[in-house]
Image (spheres, grey):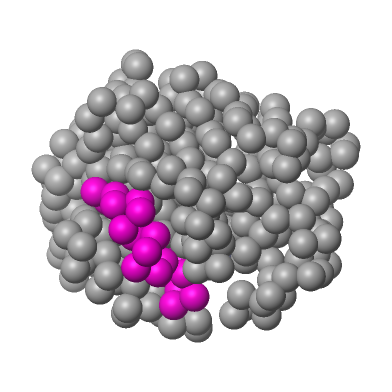
Amino acid sequence: MTILLKRKIKNFSLTVLLGGALIFGVPALERATAPPELVAKAAKGQMSLSVFNVGQGDSILAQEGDKQILIDGGPNGAVLERLGNAMPAGDREIELVILTHPHSDHVNGLAQVLARYKVDRIMATDVTVQLASFRTWRELIAEDKIPVDDPQKIKTELVGDMEYNVLSAGTQAGIRGSEHDGNSDGLNDSSIVGMLKFGQKRFLLMGDATTVVENKLIAAGTDLKADFLKVGHHGSNYSTGEKIIEAVSPAYAATSVGAKNSYGNPAWRVMQLVKNRGIVGYRTDENGTVAAVTDGNSLQVSPERIK
Ligand SMILES: [Zn+2]
């Protein structure tokens, strides 16, 4: 009985390993130790952008060779494993970390990243919150004397050939006087919204900004055209109006959202809007990490799994 059971288990593992090898096209042994998570592999001269599957939250890594820009860290330490898989072995340095806004589903993971990686530079607004992880984040920045760029003053960040342009960013003073954005504390609309560029390819990263910010950007005549859209605010109904979809007109859209989250994200309306416009839409709860690779001219986007 024991022998039979062992053999069964052995056969089962073998099937899993072979399956892994067939699906992922890598040696089975490698998969026996590493989880079958998609890692965007970019060759020399290419950039990868991964919208990590971190549950209900946001964490996005842009990487060119051994240079990284990490935008938000998700709600917990899941980002550490994602970074470990995505970054070159032995690379413990992240060139730029951007905190779009200090809600827990964006800052919690970043506090853990600061504790484990050498971070060269940070971009963050002056918005503060009463949150343990946010206190840790601030303490670690002070301890390590990491320079912090204020998006009100610095509008462009360059890391290797990656260029990040600030399109919108709030302030503490602005939040006090702001019309609320449907999420009661006004923090979402303080999100740093940015356009990441690599060669001819453009990635619009909305943070949790709502239609209030979207409409301001459109009214200001901001060039919002992008190949890839990180959908705002986890696909909630407060974000992603028809006008911005029209202005951005992306080929791909990724929504970072946790399975069976209590907010009811993403909104059916938003998902339908993406679909009806013929945009290839992925969501991290169903597709896992969504990875884009570009050489500056062409763009390939692939999810960890097809639903
Ligand atoms: Zn959020």
Q: Is residue 36 visible?
A: no
Q: Nearer the viewer, residue 15 or 9?
A: 15
Q: Quadrant of the N terminus?
A: bottom left
Provide residue 8's location: percent of width, then percent of height.
Answer: 16, 62
Question: Where 244 falls versus 225 (above or below)?
Answer: below
Q: Is residue 183 left or right of residue 218?
A: right
Q: Is residue 147 visible?
A: yes
Residue 43's image quarter?
Answer: top left
Q: Quick check: is 244 in the magenta stretch?
A: yes
Provide residue 266's location: percent of width, then percent of height.
Answer: 39, 74
Q: Is residue 49 left or right of residue 16?
A: right
Q: Residue furthest top?
A: 44
Q: Quick check: is 128 in the magenta stretch?
A: no
Q: Nearer the viewer, residue 200 or 74?
A: 200
Residue located 34% across and 16% down the image: 44
Question: Where 285 falls versus 192 (above or below)?
Answer: below
Q: Quadrant of the C terminus?
A: bottom left
Query: So how many labels did they put on this image?
Result: 0
Residue 119's image quarter?
Answer: top right
Question: Where 120 falls versus 262 (above or below)?
Answer: above
Residue located 62% across and 64% down the image: 189
Residue located 67% across and 59% down the image: 190
Q: Which residues are magenta?
A: 234-259
Q: Nearer the viewer, residue 201 or 47?
A: 201
Q: Is residue 280 left or right of residue 155?
A: left
Provide residue 9's location: percent of width, then percent of height.
Answer: 21, 60
Q: Nearer the viewer, residue 234 or 187?
A: 187
Residue 113's image quarter?
Answer: top right
Provide residue 172's location: percent of width, then percent of height.
Answer: 81, 59
Residue located 70% across and 27% down the image: 120
Question: Where 56 falls versus 76 (above or below)?
Answer: below
